[in-house]
């Protein structure tokens, strides 16, 4: 009922056409002086090629893949306020004289608006791990808020730069929102932000919907990167 039209109607089978075209391409390479065998032997497949990842070419495929991988598979360090900060140079508890103290940062909201910026990292705070050159905030853990701010919308702005307003004006900031349960109970909030250079100053300010001078206690979890 059905005729085999492969060779009669359409000429050679497809695999023969492909083979012939491949041979013709090789002949063209020879005519041009291209060593086709050497070219095939020295061209690495992408899955076999060694890369330097974050230590390699910025913005390359290997760089970006390693950047994403390290964001999810990294060492996380949790930081609070040092009991004896050194001005704006060192304010984090994990790296200063009061290392690993359970001493939270404390932000104070304004009158139904943002309060003053508070500093959470200074030039001497990062890197925590030697040879790391970049960092980002991964999560923030709210541990307590004023009683009148339970189940109320809170908003934190996080800016990086010489001062909070400097970073904000340059667009170098990110935001999170949360509504804590009674007593400030709150699971860690994920933070999305670009990676920044280790040693960059980082700032936070706080707004509570419809409230004035409400405080929030929190700790910051960070990731660091080698390049």
Image: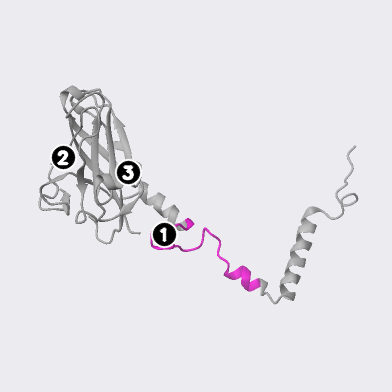
Q: Nearer the viewer, mark 2 or mark 3?
A: 3
Left or right relative to 70: residue 91: left
Residue 19 in the figure: left or right of residue 11: left
Q: Earlier in the sequence, mark 1 or mark 3?
A: 1
**Image height of 167 relative to 20, above or below:** above
Numbered circle sitting on residue 53: 1
- Name the quadrant of the N terminus: top right
Q: Which mark is residue 79?
A: none
Asked if the residue at tag 3 contacts the one at tag 1, i.e. Cβ–Cβ closer than 8 Å, the answer is no
Badge 2 or badge 3: first in the primary sequence: 2
Residue lying furthest bottom in this view? 33
Residue 137 shows in the view: no
Give the labeled residue for mark 2: 104
Q: Secondary structure at mark 3?
A: strand
Q: How many discs appear?
A: 3
Q: Is residue 215 visible?
A: yes
Tell me: residue 30, above or below residue 89. below
Q: Foreground residue, 16 or 167? A: 167
Residue positioned 30% across, 49% down in the render: 223
Distance Cα–Cα, label 1 vs label 3: 26 Å
Q: Is residue 140 left or right of residue 26?
A: left
Which region shows up in magenta? 37-61
Q: Is residue 192 magenta?
A: no
Q: Nearer the viewer, mark 1 or mark 3?
A: 3
Coordinates of residue 143 in the picture (x, y in percent): 19, 33
Who comes first in sequence, dot 1 or dot 2?
1
Judge by depth and name the residue closer to the eye, 149 or 109: 109
Packing grade of label 3 (10 A; few <14, some 14-19, many >=20) is many
Residue denoted by label 3: 173
| Residue shown at 87% from the left, 52% from the top | 7
């Amino acid at each position: 009922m059905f005729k085999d039209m492969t060779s009669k109607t359409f000429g050679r089978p497809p695999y023969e056409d492909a083979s012939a075209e491949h041979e013709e391409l090789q002949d063209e390479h020879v005519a041009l002086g291209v060593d086709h065998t050497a070219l095939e032997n020295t061209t690495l497949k992408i899955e076999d090629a060694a890369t330097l990842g974050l230590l390699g070419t910025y913005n390359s495929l290997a760089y970006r893949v390693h950047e994403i991988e390290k964001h999810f598979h990294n060492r996380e360090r949790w930081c609070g306020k040092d009991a004896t900060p050194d001005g704006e140079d060192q304010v984090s508890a994990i790296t200063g004289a009061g290392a690993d103290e359970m001493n939270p940062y404390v932000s104070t909201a304004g009158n139904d608006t943002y309060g003053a910026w508070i500093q959470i990292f200074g030039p001497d705070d990062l890197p925590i791990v030697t040879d790391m050159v970049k960092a980002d905030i991964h999560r923030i853990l709210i541990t307590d808020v004023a009683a009148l701010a339970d189940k109320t919308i809170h908003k934190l702005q996080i800016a990086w730069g010489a001062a909070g307003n400097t970073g904000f004006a340059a667009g170098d900031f990110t935001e999170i929102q949360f509504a804590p349960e009674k007593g400030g109970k709150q699971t860690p909030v994920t933070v999305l932000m670009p990676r920044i250079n280790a040693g960059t100053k980082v700032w936070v300010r706080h707004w509570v919907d419809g409230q004035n001078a409400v405080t929030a206690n929190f700790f910051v979890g960070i990731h660091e990167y080698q390049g």
